[in-house]
Image (cartoon, grey):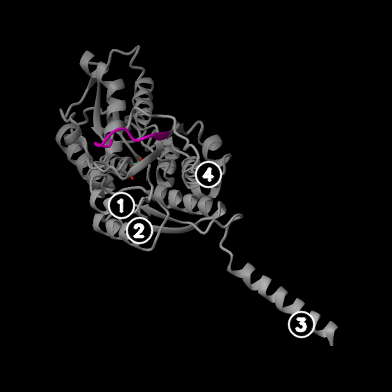
Amino acid sequence: MRKKLIGVLLCITMIAALLAGCGTKPGSNDSGKKIGVAMPTKDLQRWNQDGAYVKEKLEAAGYEVDLQYANNEIDKQVSQIENMITNGCDALVIASINGGSLGTVLKDAKAKKIPVIAYDRLIMDTEAVSYYATFDNYMVGTIQGEYIVEALDLKNQAGPFNIELFTGSSDDNNARFFFGGAMDVLNPYIDEGKLIVLSGQKEFAEVATPGWSTEEAQKRMENLITAYYADGTKLAAVLSSNDSCAIGISNALVNGGFSGDSFPVLTGQDCDITSVKNILAGTQSMSIFKDTRTLAAKVVDMVNAIMEGKEVPVNDKETYDNGTGIIPTYLCEPVFADADNYKELLIESKYYTEDQLK
Ligand code: BGC
């Protein structure tokens, strides 16, 4: 009888342990803490990768994750963040759609002492932002500028070479850093007369692309071709701050009859699959590789440090002022990718499979 009772008790304990095991959240050390992760859109490949990596790494560290995409709609992102706060998240990681539109909702986060990490894009004009993690955005621009300088051999050639300029969305703080970095490299050659912006469109506001839209970039490139290059005038280079714009520019150039040697040097950023394919086909020259796995891992380090009350890893305390003061930042390093090094950067590092680029 006694033996039977012990047997039954043992059975009950084992079943309870099994059931508890089933309910365990993914991750080695379930912290019981919840992190809200707000991403801008699924339209662009990079944000899908960013979201997936951040979620995976946070879960592996024992957090529960609420990951939301807002279809590039500002109101939607605001209400997603509102819900994350209401549902009791312990920290927020936000890649904003419009850096200046989150002040009101984040007041609530600050009142509830929920730390906020701005992811990739700085969130402007709010004291709620605790930290910022991104790639060195200015360096992205200088690498693109230097690529054009080398491709056209501007140090040795007299030119003049025609160039057109495209950057990103004016509501994205990063765009000014990308464009600023590139123009700091290119402006001396423009001043010297070796580079000529035939359209005369050189100011940030004139060359910005609303929403980083491929269609908008394509439309503007088509208009530039019609107005300045339809008679066969040579276009030597197009500066594009990222791949979503470069894809539109490339489409316009291909449709406009540019090919082979007449195809201008065209820059990009993100190593989106479509752009890498264009690089291999000769209809884009380079892109910037920002390994989102590195950024995601850094953000998880930051979250861990905040949650454990430890020193948060940052390596820049002077560059990024969001209008309320400097935000301590971790800058990851971007590198350029082209047809010569893509295999090592993208395939050997297992960022993409060879098949994805076919
Ligand atoms: C990111 C770029 C991206 C662009 C468009 C920027 O804030 O840093 O990597 O291409 O947004 O989504």
- Residue 335: x and y in percent read 45, 31
**Considering depth in this image, is 101 or 212 the residue closer to the camera?**
101
The stretch in magenta equals 322-330
Nearer the camera: disc 4 or disc 3: 3
Q: Amino acid at mark 4?
A: Tyr
- Specify whether tag 4 is near ligand 1 (CB below 8 Å): no
Q: Which residue is mark 3?
A: 8
Q: Is residue 287 visible?
A: no
| Labels 4 and 3 touching (C-beta < 8 A) | no
Q: Residues within 10 Å of mark 1 (few under 14, many from 20)?
A: few
As drawn, the residue found furthest toward the front would be: 2
Lower sequence index among marks 4 and 2: 2
Query: Residue at 38% across / 63% down in the picture?
Result: 87
What kind of residue is marked 3? Val
Under mark 2, the amino acid is Ile
Mark seen at residue 111: 1
Q: How many C-alpha atoms fall within 10 Å of the one at disc 4: few (<14), some, or many (≥20)? A: few
Which element type, helix, strand or loop, lies under badge 1?
A: helix
Q: CA distance from mark 4 to mark 2?
A: 33 Å
